[in-house]
Amino acid sequence: MKSLKIKVHLSEKIGKGYGTFWRFKGRYRVVKGSRGSKKSTTIAQWIIYNMMKYPLANTLVVRRVFNTHKDSTWTQLKWAANNLKVSHLWKFSKSPLEATYLPTGQKILFRGLDDPMSITSITVGIGYLCWAWFEEAYQVMDEDAFNKIDMSIRGKLPEGYFKQITLSFNPWSEKHWLKKRFFDVEDDDILAITTTYKCNEWLGEDDLKVFEKMKRDHPKRYKVEGEGEWGIAEGTVYDYTVKDFKVEELLKKKTTRAVFGLDFGYINDPSALIAAIIDEDEDNKAIYVFDEHYERGMKGPALAKMIKYKGYAKERIIADSAEGRLIDELKDYGIYRVEPCEKGPDSVLYGIQLVQQYKIYVLPSCHWTQVELDNYIWDTKDGAILNKPIDDWNHLLDALRYAVMAKDKRGFVGAISI
């Protein structure tokens, strides 16, 4: 009985805009781009296709946090195998999280920078570790962490094979090391490109309308999320430092309290929960951001479930007073200590001034807080800086402002200790 052969036209699966990227064989292949620019889907299909083409090649896929692979890169690669109509030749397992090309035993391995030992001890049973893919590379704040993996992709390969590291990300801030390392240099071993949603043939009219609305209403956000350009770094409202710290140790101090803020969103804007410790020590007034949640499309039940999952259901949460219905709904679902923030004339500027009295430290894991801090800037008119911030990149920062403004009778800010 003859086996059924399926003919797949690769160009119809990949589409336009990535020809040079697909063919490049230099050491570093870097793509920054807008939302919907098919970066991840293109890379996932490249990996599936080329591992089948090169029977001794294995691939390492890296994200900052290991447990984010399952719903992102692992699923994307599984989709790619299906889209290329070769899923019957691949096994995608959840424990361990990996993908195996069944005819040869080649592996796609998944690792997180939050487990350094899993990175340094990488071995493959068949062939060579040829390729690595850093998805959401912007979240890799430490260039040394990237260098360690870069150095692990080494050794002589058979003729025709090549070593390559691919990085994909949204370019939230020009201050990131990725810009200087890959985009501000000329090197034949680096391909650094920018792609946008305009090269994605599979977006619908409703998707395109989202970008057109963003272009009209939020031009600065559109520059990053629509055009794939670097975020603005000049004129930021707050200064901050990324720093590791222990929540439990900080809360032992008599001058500290944990605070929680919540800003509501839905379709165009995310709902944003922020958790921080405020230290009122006169010699070291500081805010320590230790947790966040940032997600679009969340209704009351989903918000309540998320808050309970994080263990904050009994905490005092200061929420956007403009959404009284959602606050009541959260209480119906067991988040009893949520309460509206106080707003009034110039409350935004007043709250900003309060926050600015503190040094701000952010855990490396709080990615979206860093993105907003990098892009929340003072507005301008005719080149002059105005005494008001832009109404963008401010969902987590508004939530933080609500919490800071909610002072209790003892002079501490926000909620009880966790």
Image (cartoon, rainbow, N blue to C red):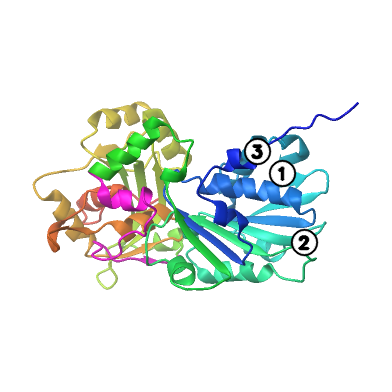
- Disc 1 secondary structure class: loop
Q: Which residue is disc 1 drawn over?
A: 95
Residue 25: percent from the left, percent from the top? 64, 62
Q: Nearer the viewer, mark 3 or mark 1?
A: 3
The reply, left or right, for residue 4 in relation to residue 293 is right
| Sooner in the amino-acid sequence: mark 1 or mark 2 | 1
Q: Residue at x 23, y 65 (%)?
A: 235
Residue 188 visible to an observer of this rendering: yes
Q: Amino acid under label 1? A: Ser
Amino acid type indicated by mark 2: Tyr
- Closer to us: 208 or 225: 208
Decide which of 193, 128 is in the foreground and name it.
193
Above or below — where is 400 with respect to 314? below
Can I make out residue 297 in this image?
A: no
* Label 1 environment density (alpha carbons within 10 Å; few <14, some 14–19, many ≥20): few
| 1 and 2 marks in contact (CB < 8 Å) | no
How far from the left and from the top, in percent, is residue 355?
Answer: 23, 59
**Mark 3 → mark 2, Cα distance in angstroms:** 28 Å
Mark 3 against mark 2, which lies toward the viewer? 3
The label number, if any, that marks residue 9 in the structure image: 3
Return the mark for residue 128. Answer: 2
- Residue at image coords 50%, 63%: 192
Whether residue 237 appears in magenta in the rendering, the answer is: yes
Q: Is residue 374 left or right of residue 53?
A: left
